[in-house]
Image (spheres, rainbow, N blue to C red):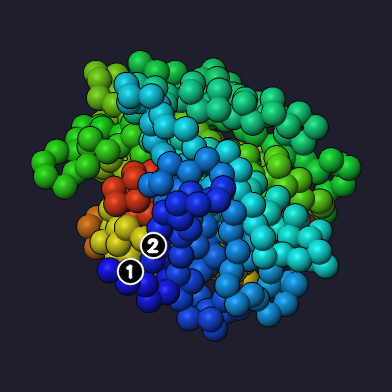
């Protein structure tokens, strides 16, 4: 029996038996009033619609797809925006991780025609589709990196990924990679302390976007955590729930940053320079490795007592944040990281936590996330919890203990930001970076970061 209610995400396909179209599919959009809503949290109905189309096309082995919306939309602006979101959802929804499987990847859809933007809105629709495509390709780039196993996605591999972005858009992107000796000269003791036990050389990646005309009104930085594998060090991840087998995704923050860079290399926003910074390394175990109780010195001279070698991401981010301020002169910075299990406990695997002492900064990320269709939630930056980071023998400890761990992690990072001169926010994506039900790597963060950066145009 054909049972179709039209709820969002529902799809029914039937074989026609005649004509050029082999199948006709109905995909639900849900209530009509949701079509123009700007307050919804998460993917727009049109992104979900695009993803639904991709799924149906794959199931029916379609090579070409034409799409229309029955009943039409209320305005040309709505049509154009919907076209962009459908394209974005379709591209994201069609992504499949196949490169590490021996079975050949199936052929995908060769063409998608959107038939609901009439002539009066064609230019606006084309612009929206181009934007939706760029954002989706940024998310796909992120997924491609995160899904790769740690014997493939090494720090060197991330540097090569950044190089591919720079090579694809040499008029707006340039790359500098600092080697270990370069970082030693800059006194990046926190970052290098984490990298010490690994056989893989650390790579400090600095990719810069500059608008085509060279005119810059605002300088931003996006700092991504780039731990390509995290064993936990001597505080080794062990036992059920430790997720050591999944620690390939501990570079999800760096992947999101590079995905955003990929999107911006295509969008080419005006008036803004964006520095993408990744202090990439592995956190391994060896005789030369970081020990609980060691004291590290960051590039600004601040000393950190390491009371937990599994709180390593914040150590790499500390030197990266300082670099963003001192070398790049960034006026506004977001760091993004798979930083704490505590954030997953608080928000689950579908929502990113955001911390910032600046209301306008937090609001700008929320706005960007709604446009991107990604879920974020502002969390408290409770200053009294900073007492948990006090050390009797160093300037601070790197971990505040079990309670409020996501908050104390953010407070640790804040110690390395000149918040009187720089607006800053921290994004913890430990939850939404991976979702087995959605096929593994989600690409989370890339589209929000790209929307945030482009919003300064």
Which residue in the protein does label 1 denote?
Answer: 2
For the residue labelled by badge 1, is the local secondary structure a helix, a strand or a loop? loop
For the residue labelled by badge 2, is the local secondary structure a helix, a strand or a loop? strand
Left or right of 85 in this view: 6 = left
Q: Which residue does the image show at 70% across and 40% down from the upper left?
A: 265
Q: Residues within 10 Å of mark 2 (few under 14, many from 20)?
A: some
Closer mark to the observer between disc 2 and disc 1: 1
Label number found at residue 12: 2
Q: Would you identify the image quadrant in which residue 451 lies?
A: bottom right
Q: Which residue does the image show at 77% across and 41% down from the upper left?
A: 210
**Nearer to the camera, 360 or 423:** 360
Q: Residues within 10 Å of mark 1 (few under 14, many from 20)?
A: few
Measuring from the top left, give residue 436's x and y in whole percent. 29, 48
Measuring from the top left, give residue 342's x and y in whole percent. 28, 58
Quadrant for the C terminus, please. bottom right
Vertical placement of residue 22 versus 342, above or below: above
How much space separates mark 2 and mark 1, taking CA atoms? Answer: 8 Å
Left or right of 382 in this view: 160 = right
Measuring from the top left, give residue 440's x and y in whole percent. 34, 44
Label number found at residue 114: none
Q: Would you identify the image quadrant in which residue 264 lies?
A: top right
- Whether pointer 2 and pointer 1 mark residues with C-beta atoms closer than 8 Å, the reply is yes
**Nearer to the camera, 365 or 195:** 365
Measuring from the top left, give residue 193's x and y in whole percent. 39, 29
Q: Is residue 103 visible?
A: yes
Q: Is residue 225 visible?
A: no
Left or right of 49 in this view: 219 = right
Q: Which residue does the image show at 50% across and 52% down from the upper left?
A: 18
First reached walking from the N terminus: tag 2 or tag 1: 1
């Amino acid at each position: 029996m054909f049972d179709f209610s039209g709820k969002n995400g529902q799809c029914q396909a039937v074989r026609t038996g005649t004509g050029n179209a082999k199948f006709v599919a109905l995909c639900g959009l849900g209530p009509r009033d949701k079509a123009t809503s700007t307050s919804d949290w998460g993917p727009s109905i049109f992104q979900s619609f695009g993803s639904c189309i991709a799924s149906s096309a794959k199931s029916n082995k379609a090579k070409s797809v034409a799409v229309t919306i029955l009943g039409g939309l209320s305005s040309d602006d709505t049509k154009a925006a919907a076209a962009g979101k459908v394209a974005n959802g379709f591209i994201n929804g069609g992504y499949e991780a196949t490169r590490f499987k021996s079975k050949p990847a199936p052929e995908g859809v060769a063409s998608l025609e959107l038939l609901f933007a009439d002539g009066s809105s064609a230019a606006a629709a084309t612009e929206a589709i181009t934007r939706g495509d760029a954002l989706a390709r940024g998310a796909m780039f992120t997924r491609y990196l995160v899904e790769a196993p740690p014997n493939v996605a090494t720090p060197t591999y991330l540097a090569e990924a950044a190089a591919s972005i720079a090579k694809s858009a040499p008029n707006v992107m340039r790359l500098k990679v600092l080697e270990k000796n370069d970082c030693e000269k800059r006194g990046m003791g926190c970052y290098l302390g984490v990298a010490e036990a690994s056989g893989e050389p650390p790579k400090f990646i600095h990719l810069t976007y500059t608008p085509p005309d060279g005119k810059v009104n605002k300088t931003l930085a996006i700092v991504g955590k780039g731990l390509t594998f995290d064993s936990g060090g001597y505080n080794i991840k062990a036992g059920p729930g430790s997720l050591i087998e999944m620690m390939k995704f501990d570079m999800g923050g760096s992947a999101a940053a590079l995905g955003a860079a990929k999107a911006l290399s295509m969008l080419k926003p005006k008036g803004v320079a964006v520095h993408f910074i990744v202090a990439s390394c592995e956190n391994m175990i060896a005789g030369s490795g970081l020990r609980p109780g060691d004291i590290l010195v960051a590039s600004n001279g601040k000393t950190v007592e390491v009371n937990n070698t599994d709180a390593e991401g914040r150590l790499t981010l500390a030197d990266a944040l300082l670099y963003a301020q001192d070398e790049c002169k960034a006026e506004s910075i977001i760091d993004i990281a798979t930083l704490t299990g505590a954030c997953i406990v608080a928000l689950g695997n579908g929502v990113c936590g955001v911390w910032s002492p600046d209301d306008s900064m937090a609001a700008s990320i929320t706005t960007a996330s709604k446009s991107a269709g990604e879920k974020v939630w502002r969390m408290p930056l409770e200053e009294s919890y900073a007492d948990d980071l006090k050390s009797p023998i160093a300037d601070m400890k790197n971990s505040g203990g079990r309670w409020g761990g996501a908050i104390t992690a953010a407070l640790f990072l804040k110690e390395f930001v000149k918040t009187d001169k720089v607006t800053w926010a921290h994004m913890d994506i430990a939850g939404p970076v991976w979702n087995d039900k959605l096929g593994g790597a989600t690409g989370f963060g890339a589209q929000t970061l790209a929307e945030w950066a482009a919003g300064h145009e």
